[in-house]
Amino acid sequence: MKIGEKIFEVEVEEIKSERVTVAPTPTTPTERVLKKPEVTTPVKATVISGEESKIVRAPIPGTIVSVKCREGDEVSKGDPLLVLESMKMENVIYSPTSGKVKRIAVSEGSSVNYGDVLVEIE
């Protein structure tokens, strides 16, 4: 084999093994494009309304950096409830409604997934 001006001696060893089937490789750039994944747009804070309470859920997965309210606090719509860090960015979760904080389901340092309960407001 010659690469540039250098000549290399190459030996190929035959290895016998079971037959492996490989899927064909796309040949054109358009065939190589992956299917666009289904995108679900996260919302500010998911709220489930009930007669007595409203549950604020995590809009994205991450870690709770700080809790800005306490159980029993009166909050107004737009007040910060907690800070959620995701992908090295801090996201403030605001109260989607006015009311009294009935329960805080997370604490600082907690890891949360999309849809986990964060705060319950009555």
Image: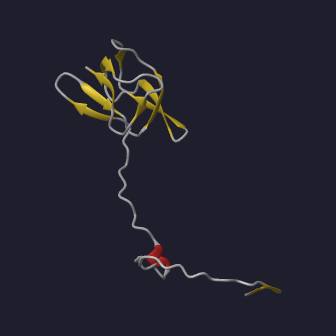
Residue at 28 percent across and 33 percent down: it is: 47
- Return the residue nearer the eye: 119 or 2: 2
Residue at 42 percent across and 22 percent down: it is: 107
Image position of 76 (left or right of 54):
right
- Return the residue nearer the eye: 93 or 64: 64
Image position of 75 (left or right of 108):
left
Image position of 90 (left or right of 79):
right
Q: Quadrant of the C terminus?
A: top left
Residue at 19 percent across and 28 percent down: it is: 50
Figure colour scheme: secondary structure
Where residue 81 appears, x then y in whole percent? 41, 24
Where residue 88 appears, x then y in whole percent? 55, 39
Which residue, as the protein is rendered here, is positioned at the far right?
5
Where residue 18 appears, x then y in whole percent? 42, 76
Q: Quadrant of the N terminus?
A: bottom right
The quarter holding residue 72 reads top left
- Return the residue nearer the eye: 73 or 78: 73
- Return the residue nearer the eye: 13 or 5: 13
Which residue, as the protein is rendered here, is positioned at the far top?
72
